[in-house]
Image: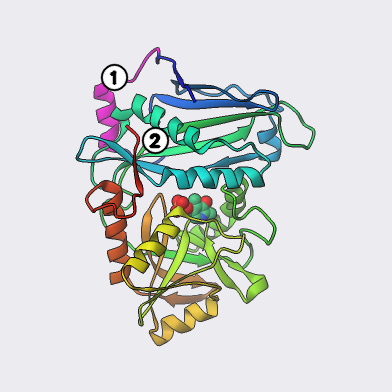
Amino acid sequence: MKFDVVPHPNPTDPAQIVEVLKNPGFGTNFSDHTAVIDWTAEAGWQNARVEAYAPITLDPAAAVLHYAQEVFEGMKAYRHSDGGIWTFRPFANAARMNRSARRMALPELDEQDFVQSLEQLVSADRDWVPSGEGEALYLRPFMFASEAFLGVRPAKEISYRVIASPAGNYFGGELKPVKIWVSRDYVRAAPGGTGAAKTGGNYAGSLLPQQQAAEKGCDQVLFLDPLHDNAIEELGGMNVFLVTDDGRIITPELTGTILEGITRDSVLQLARDRGLTVEERRITLDEWEAGVNDGTITEVFACGTAAVITPIGELLDGEKTIASTGTGEVTQAIREELLGIQTGAVEDRHGWMHRLA
Ligand SMILES: *Cc1c(COP(=O)(O)O)cnc(C)c1O
């Protein structure tokens, strides 16, 4: 697909970019440009372009504002020592966005066009990619129903966009185990629902339980599947892993109510490479608690693009605290290897990295 590059009328001063990159934070600063592709039912995908980042004009009747017809992706671009800007498994994100799009009755975008949109944006905004340890340019591709129409049917006008935001080291350098609140009042997803799609509504529904978690002094929420003996599902935006004392690594199987994390898939591969026995199956909260108490479960961690891998310290279930370990050896080793591959410090055996610019 051919992208037009519309020059920015008033680009950020390079010294100002350097200033922003000194303290990138997360999700508050945005690069100068955005990649855009329009879609209509009649013409399909068209008008691919890179243009100045700016507010969007939407009709108040735009379908996304009423019926939440939208999907998104999240990935990171790293500045490597070879001078290139690289990202991790972008074709996996492209394929997942299309799976999400199918579920939300949105059009699919050719995987090559998806990856090209990232290349075009990062080429225009390469100065916005930070170079500090653990820092990256966070890329947020998303697609939404822009058609002005209040009837309930798939929209005939869709906008696909990519924005980019410099992201600092998630943990400020130190790996601190997080405290998790078990949600007994709410579920994240249900059989046949939208749990496997990366769509905003899943996040909207997780905000109230997240608020409860914060009130209890917890960082994040663990969702359960009450239809299956309270099997563990995932956190609001991260998948969960348990490590045993006899070399097994266990994660909930993909049943349609869990989001298929690309980090999850990569952790499974790296665990196999290390000779760990991988189990994708239902695991209940009771099994987790019993395993922590009798010492057979030695480590628990969560994973996703934003934080990569973060150890789970404590699990709070009502008044009961299920204490886990701190940062275990397996958690630490897989995290270092994965981060090493992403930042270019460790050999990319699986061909996961893709140069964007
Ligand atoms: C994005 C997301 C994840 C993590 O996926 P990655 O591809 O590893 O970033 C996990 N759970 C939910 C609900 C998500 O939206």
Asked whether 52 or 177 is in front, the reply is: 52
Residue tagged 2: 165
> Where the C terminus falls, by quadrant?
top left
Residue 14 among those drawn in magenta? yes
Asked whether 131 or 169 is in front, the reply is: 131
Can you tell me whether the CB of the residue at mark 2 lies under 8 Å from the nearest atom of ligand 1? no
Kindly identify the residue that appears in the image at 46 percent across and 22 percent down: 3
- Seen in the image, is 33 located left or right of residue 171? right
Residue range corresponding to the magenta coloring: 9-23
Q: Secondary structure at mark 2?
A: strand
Q: Is residue 5 above or below residue 149?
A: above
Q: Quadrant of residue 144?
A: top right
Q: Is residue 210 above or below residue 329?
A: above
Name the residue type under label 2. Answer: Ser
Majority secondary structure of magenta residues:
helix
Name the residue type under label 1. Answer: Asp
Asked whether 120 or 339 is in front, the reply is: 120
Q: Which mark is residue 13?
A: 1
Q: Secondary structure at mark 1?
A: loop
Which comes sooner in the sequence, label 1 or label 2? 1
The crowd level at tag 1 (other Cα within 10 Å; few <14, some 14-19, many 20+) is few
Q: Residue furthest left?
A: 81
Kindly identify the residue that appears in the image at 55 percent across and 76 percent down: 284
Q: Residue furthest bottom?
A: 294
- Seen in the image, is 262 located left or right of residue 256? left
Kindly identify the residue that appears in the image at 58 percent across and 72 percent down: 231
Q: Position of residue 60 (x, y in %)?
A: 69, 26
